[in-house]
Every structure is written in structure tokens, then in C-alpha cells.
Image (cartoon, rainbow, N blue to C red):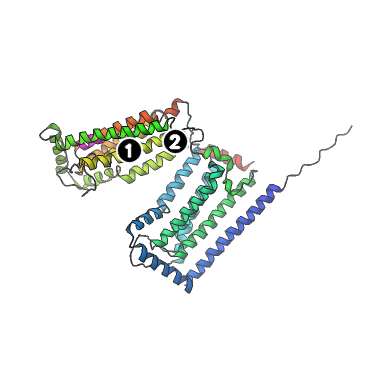
Amino acid sequence: MGTELEPTRRVPLRPLEHFAGRSLAGLLLVVGCGLGFGLLLMLVRVEFGPLYDLDHGTAAELNRVISEQGPLVTVLRAITDLGGRPIMLWLVSVAVVGLLIRRQPRLAIYLVVAGAGALFLDPALKLLVGRLRPAVEVTLAGSAGNSFPSGHALGSIVAYGALLLVFLPALAPRWRRPAIAVVATVVFLIGFTRVALGVHFVSDVIAGWLLGLAWLGVTAYAFRLWRLEVGQRVPHLIEGLEPEAAHEIAPAPDEEKILPKARLGIAEIITGWVLVFGVLFGFGMLVSYHADDTFVDRIDTAVPQWFADHRTPALDDFSHWWSKAGDTHAILLVSLVFCPLVLAVWRRWRPVVFVALTMFGELTLFLATARAVDRPRPPVENLDGPMPTASFPSGHIAATMCLWVAIAVLVWPRTGRVLRWLAVAAAVIMPVGVAVSRMYRGMHHPSDFVGAMLLTGLWIGLLYWVVRPNADVHAGNEPATLPDDDTVSAELETAGSR
């Protein structure tokens, strides 16, 4: 008795048809952007009259109006920084490291390729075109190099667009379109500021947008082809590039509540802030105005004077750079690197909230106490010149101590022996180095250092008690680990052979 052969099943074509239709629309968009950029480039090179008049007339008029509005200029400068290379590099670099930690090498590669392309296209085209920047009456922002196309416009649309495509799956469907609208608004505002501040013509910005959109379309299309080749469905762009990665790229996918009793916690933090301020104010007034002819007064006078008597050019330079480790930019940089890594590795918001509250509380306590106590600087030459704040407590020392102690508090129960002791060492060496540098430069008394220690101990102790930053460790939270090179290669090889 023979057996009947089953008829061969045909693969349904509908997904392929959908992909072809979407690809055609995307191709038309990319081609349209490319043609638009090429047309603008040609018109700029031949100095087409109407475009020339529009560019120069807009630049002159905006400069005339905006240069008279000081607060508006400050806002425009802040917005334009969002499209600068430092911010772009930080965003993409942190995202790439986070994706590698979460074992998403394909998405990390996509970000690297998209970002590298934008970094190459901007200076290459500027050099080829060689267009000078607008000559405006009042210089509102400095910018080096040529003008066409706008690097801020190109970089922002590529960087923010690529990040949006990567992380869209982590958003609930109802938030995806608003997220796209927000990103589009940010990109538009960045481009507008480049014209408003007089560093680019209108055509420079439009060219940057068109070129950035074209490059973003090319890279997204290549990624979609990659998925098709490995046998995965090609999603609609509103779903992001890799919908299956939604759980892995979500910042804290398994965390239900950051603080179990949020209202009580907020009340405790506010009450604690007031009490800590009271202690700092009392101690600051005591050492500043009521310690004459005491041991504290003799130390506060002798130490800055001893440092001033032993200054050398080499030590001046060394103390300058070590002192910089405690300024706002350095503290913000370390925080902006540490906090995203915390989310990537430990998948919890609570440690990030702990660091954010630590630094916000330190800043507000320092400003309030310095204003209330108003202690003069030591009576020696102040190498950093006049400062906008008073001497007690030291803001540099307090910020450095709060940051590195908070990091040590988080790292200690979560890592092995080497990392935990490195964190403790940093929590001691960094504040001491900054403190010695600040006193050497004649900016603070020893009791200002003690005030910073008091601020750090009381404030971090309060937050540790209220926030419980390591509660997830006791609940059994297992951190993600950074995959090694062999793991990444194996994952890519597996994906390519599906």
C-alpha cells in the first residue's frame, strides 16, 4: 500500500508583500531626501539669488532681534548644546555599552554604524563645499569650521532618530507616537537655534536635516534587511528595529515600585533636609564667627597660610587639575556615566534615584548654607580668583565626597572584592585630593572640609535610611553581565545562520 506525499506548503507572501511596500515607501523617502540635499548643494554652490537673499536676510534679522534678548540667548544656547558632539557622543556611547551589557550586539552595531556615518559625513561635506559661516553684527555663539551642512542638524537627527528606533520597543504602544513627536520637536529646535544664534544659514540646517534623514533611512533599511535575511519578521517602524528586545532594553523591566511608600519617603526627605541644614548652619556659624582664639581658629588660619608659603608652579598646576575633579562638570560627567550603567547592569531605578537625590540634596544644602553663613575665604591669595559663593561649606569637596561615597554604598554589596575596595578607595582618595587642592589654592579653611564631611554623612545617611538603595540585592536581584567577545561573536554568528 503506497503512501501519499503531502503537498508542499507554500510560504505566505503577505509579510513579504508588506515588507516590499514599506521598503518602496522608505526608498522613495530616502531618494527624495538625497535629491533635496543635492539640489540645495547645487543652489548653494552657484549662489542662487533667492536662496542667497533668504539665507543672509534671515540670519541678519534674527541676529538683530535675538541679540537684544539676553535670557532668550541663554535658552537658545542651552538647546543648541543638545545637538553638540559632546552630548551626542555621550548618548550613543552610553547606549552602546548598555546594549552590550544587555546582550543586544546587533542594536549596538546599528548605533555605532549610524553614529560613525554622521561623524564622517559632516566634516567631509563641509570641507568639500567650503561655505563660510554667516557674518552677523553680534556674535552670540562661537563655532569653528565651515557652514554647509549644519553638523548639529545632521548629528541630532541621526543620533536621536537612531536611539528612538532602538528603544521604541521599550515604550508602551500609546507612548510611541508622542515619543516620536518629542524627538522631532527637539531636532527642530536644535536646528532653529543654529540659525537664531547666527552660526548657520537656513539652507545649512535644512541640508543637515535632509542628509541626516537619508542616512538614517539607509541604516534602518539595512537593519531591516538583516532581519529578513536571518528569518525574522520585518516590523513596522513604529514598533522599533527589534521588537523582540523590548524586555531587555527596558531600563528596569521587573521593578514594580521605586519606593513602596513614596509620600512618606518624600516627607521624610524634606524633613531631613531641613534638619541637616540646621546642623550645617549652626556648625558654620560657630566655626566662622564664634571660634576666635580657639584651636579651630588657629588651625583655620595656619593651614591655608602654610600652603600659601609652600606654593610652586608645578604644585599650582597639579592642584588646579585635581581641584577640577570636584567641579560641576566633572561631577556631572561621572554621574551621567555611572547612572546609565547602573540601569543597564542592575535593572533598577532605585540606585539611580539614590544618586540623583544625593547630588540634588548636596547642591541645595551647599547653596543654602553658603548663602546663610556667608563665610569669607581664607586671608591668603586665592588662586582661583573671586568665587560667586562663600567659603563654608566647600562645594567642591562636598560634591566629590557625596558622589563617590554614594557610588561606594551601591557598589559594595553588589560586586566582588576588587571592585568594592576600588570604590572605597575612590571614596577616600578623591575627596581628600580635592580637599587638599582647595586648601592649597587658598579657597577653603580646614573647617570648611569638616563641614563638607558633616553634610555628606548626614545627608547620605538620611537617604540610605529612606530610599534603601540596596533593597533589591537582599531580594535576590541578579545583575546583568557584560558579554565577552566570544559571546558577542557567537550571538552574531547564530543570528546570521538562522
Residue type, numbered disc 2: Trp
Residue 446 lies, with reference to residue 471, above or below; the image says below
Q: Is residue 404 visible?
A: yes
Instruction: Specify the quadrant that holds the C terminus.
Output: top right
Range covered by the magenta-colored residues: 446-452
Q: Residues within 10 Å of mark 1 (few under 14, many from 20)?
A: many
Q: Is residue 244 left or right of residue 192?
A: right
Between 359 and 430, the one nearer to me in the picture: 359
Q: Is residue 453 visible?
A: no
Q: Is residue 156 left or right of residue 31?
A: left
Between 133 and 177, the one nearer to me in the picture: 177
Between 410 and 69, the one nearer to me in the picture: 69
- Residue at the spot of label 1: 361
Residue type, numbered disc 1: Gly
Between 183 and 128, the one nearer to me in the picture: 183
Query: Residue 245, how many percent across, how many down?
Result: 56, 40
Query: Residue 423, how many percent across, how many down?
Result: 35, 33
Residue found 35% across the figure and 31% down from its top? 268
User: SS at mark 1?
Assistant: helix
- Residue at the spot of label 2: 349
Mark nearest the camera among 1 and 2 is 1
Query: Residue 347, how many percent across, how many down?
Result: 47, 35
Instruction: Specify the quadrant that holds the N terminus.
Output: top right
Q: CA distance from mark 1 to mark 2?
A: 18 Å
Q: Does the magenta segment cover residue 448?
A: yes
Q: Are marks 1 and 2 in contact (CB under 8 Å)?
A: no
Q: Does the magenta segment cover residue 155?
A: no
Residue found 48% across the figure and 60% down from its top? 208
Compare marks 1 and 2 and give the one earlier in the sequence.
2
Q: Main secondary structure of the magenta part?
A: helix
